[in-house]
Image: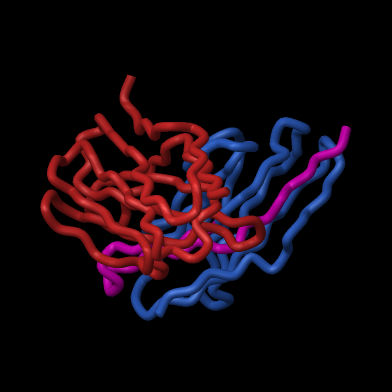
Chain colours: A blue, B red
């Protein structure tokens, strides 16, 4: 079975500071990892994904994430946070052995204060 | 514009009534999904379909039913057997490969009175 953990329900940062939203995963095969963002009362938007290759992946709105196989982690990062980054962030995992199903974490609410 | 539409945005129903949520996509995606979102519980998979006329149960399928008669459409019926149907429902689609990201609709908020 595959699973995703987002250990922090909430992350608070000041505008201009770096931010990190944590994600760890468990799969039986090679992981395909995704980050999505949800603004209030809306659907999720794709941010970035890791499939293979370079462990550092870059995505939309200046976000990046680092895949760490030994620590089974895929933390989302941004060098300088904006107030407009405030939203709910979800990490998700898929693998080939699970018929294409995605498993999502419980989400982390990011609040960026001016 | 390509995308996924869900209707209605808000839906109110009396307890014991079945209700059908609409999901349409014009992205030419093979796979479609239904998720339920409750506060603090993330997204839970209800049903998914990887091809027309075929679908599989997700993690919380009890009390729900779906059909996939057309590639573009994947309606979800919330039946009276669903014990706690009040929630935010999200539809998504993607290419069939596991490497493809999902595209989400705007969601339907169902309230059962």
Q: Position of residue A44 (x, y in %)?
A: 51, 42
Q: Position of residue B92 (x, y in %)?
A: 37, 45
Q: Quadrant of residue A5?
A: bottom right
Quarter placement of the N terminus of chain A: bottom left
Q: Is residue B81 visible?
A: yes
Q: Is residue A78 above or below residue A10?
A: above
Residue sitting at x 50%, y 56%:
B85
State yes or no: residue A4 in magenta: no
Q: Is residue A44 visible?
A: no
Residue sitting at x 36%, y 66%:
B61
Relative to residue A16, is residue B44 drawn left or right?
A: left
Q: Position of residue B99 (x, y in %)?
A: 32, 55
Q: Nearer the viewer, residue B33 or B14?
A: B14
**First to last magenta residue range:** A91-114
What is the count of numbered marks? 0
Q: Position of residue A104 (x, y in %)?
A: 50, 61
Q: Nearer the viewer, residue B111 or A6?
A: B111
State yes or no: residue A95 in magenta: yes
Relative to residue B6, is residue B55 drawn left or right?
A: left
């Amino acid at each position: 079975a595959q699973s995703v953990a987002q250990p922090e329900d909430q992350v608070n940062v000041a505008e201009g500071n770096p931010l990190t939203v944590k994600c760890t995963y468990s799969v039986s095969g090679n992981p395909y990892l995704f980050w999505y963002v949800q603004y209030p009362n809306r659907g999720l938007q794709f941010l970035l994904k890791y499939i293979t290759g370079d462990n550092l992946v870059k995505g939309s709105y200046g976000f990046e994430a680092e895949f760490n196989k030994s620590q089974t982690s895929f933390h989302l990062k941004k060098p300088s946070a904006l107030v407009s980054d405030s939203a709910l962030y979800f990490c998700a995992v898929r693998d080939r052995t699970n018929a294409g199903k995605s498993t999502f974490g419980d989400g982390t609410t990011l609040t960026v204060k001016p | 514009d390509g995308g996924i539409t869900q209707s209605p945005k808000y839906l109110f129903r009396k307890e014991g009534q079945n209700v059908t949520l609409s999901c349409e996509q014009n992205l030419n995606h093979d796979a479609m999904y239904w998720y339920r979102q409750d506060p603090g519980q993330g997204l839970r998979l209800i049903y998914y379909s990887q091809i027309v006329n075929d679908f599989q149960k997700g993690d919380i399928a009890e009390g729900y039913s779906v059909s996939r008669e057309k590639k573009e459409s994947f309606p979800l019926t919330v039946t009276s057997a669903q014990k706690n149907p009040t929630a935010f429902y999200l539809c998504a689609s993607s290419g069939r490969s596991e490497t493809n990201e999902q595209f989400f609709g705007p969601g339907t908020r169902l309230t059962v009175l």
